[in-house]
Structure formats: C-alpha cells, structure tokens
Image (tube, helix red, strand yellow):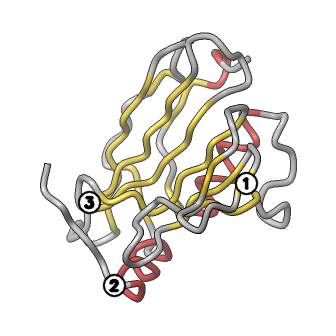
Amino acid sequence: MANVSLTQAEADELIALEKHRVDAREWLYPHMGGKAIIPLASRDGRERFHLDLYRSRIVFSRSTFQNRARGVVVLVRLDTGGPPHRNPDFTEVSAPHLHIYREGYGDKWAIPVPRLYFANLTDTWRTLRDFMQFCAIVDPPNIRRELFP
C-alpha cells in the first residue's frame, strides 16, 4: 500500500469538503464481526472517499466508524467500546475516542470524543448520524437501520 501523506491544510480541506453518496444502493449495517466499506464522492466527483463501518465480533458495544480519502488516508475515525489509545507522546485516551488526521502522524493521535458533536454515544444509530455530520457527509448513504443493536 502506498504511503500517502497530506499537509494539515489539505487534510482539513478534505474533512470539511461536502461528501455525497455515489448511488442509491442500500447498505446493511454490519453484523457482529462484519464491515461495510461505502464509497462517497465530492459534489463534483473529483475527490473520492470511503465511509468504513466495522463492528466487533465479541464486544457488543465496540465499533469503528472511519472516513478515508484517496483510498488509504484516514481523515477521521471514531472508536467506541474498545481499549484506551496511547498517543505518540505516551498520553492515554480512554474509549470512546476520536482520531483526526494530524500532519506527520496520520491517524495516530486520538482525543476524547467532543460531546458538542456527539450527543449520545450509547445510541449507535445517532452516533453514526453524528459521525457522518462531523465528516461533512451531507448526502449520506442508505444504511438499513433495523439491524442496529
């Protein structure tokens, strides 16, 4: 896999760029141990993104929502129900935590989840909607809700 790095300005611009679903396909929220990789695009189609949904096989409350650009660059990742994360400076951030691209480190830094943007982390559906809004996914994909815990 290619090592793609962005400047902080480029990453911030990609995070803020409006993202749209690429088709009307209905996506199933992953079963335990499953994942969904959903394609997204900028309005003009010049930038491609992915919304990744991962669900733990064992821990019911553990999931990961991730927004990637250019195939491999993680712009934003929300980890819930998992272990603490150790940052490059050896500080530890408990779960849930949010990774936001940082120049020179990629997604290696985590911060506590900002409650201003994520109102109720115990509600998976609401958290996914909040995550999509945080990532500027303005035309979200069709994800079947009844499969949520």
Secondary structure found at label 2? loop
Residue on which disc 3 sits = 48
Above or below for 7 versus 101: below
- Between residue 21 and residue 2, name the one nearer to us: 2
Q: Tell me if mark 2 has few (under 14), some (14-19) or many (20+) residues whose alpha carbon lies within 10 angstroms of its own.
A: few
Whole-percent x, y for residue 56 in the image: 57, 20
Q: Is residue 13 above or below residue 48?
A: below
Which amino acid does the dot numbered 2 rest on?
A: Thr
**Residue bearing the label numbered 1:** 93
Give the farthest residue toward the bottom: 9
Judge from the rendering whether residue 16 lies leftward or rightward of residue 2; answer left or right: right
Q: Amino acid at mark 1?
A: Val
Marks 3 and 1 sit apart, C-alpha to C-alpha, by 30 Å
Looking at the image, do the residues carrying marks 1 and 2 touch, with CB atoms under 8 Å apart?
no
> In the rendered structure, which disc, 3 or 1, sits on the residue that comes first in sequence?
3
Amino acid at the residue labelled 3: Arg
Secondary element at image label 3: strand
Verify CB contact (< 8 Å) between mark 3 and mark 2: no
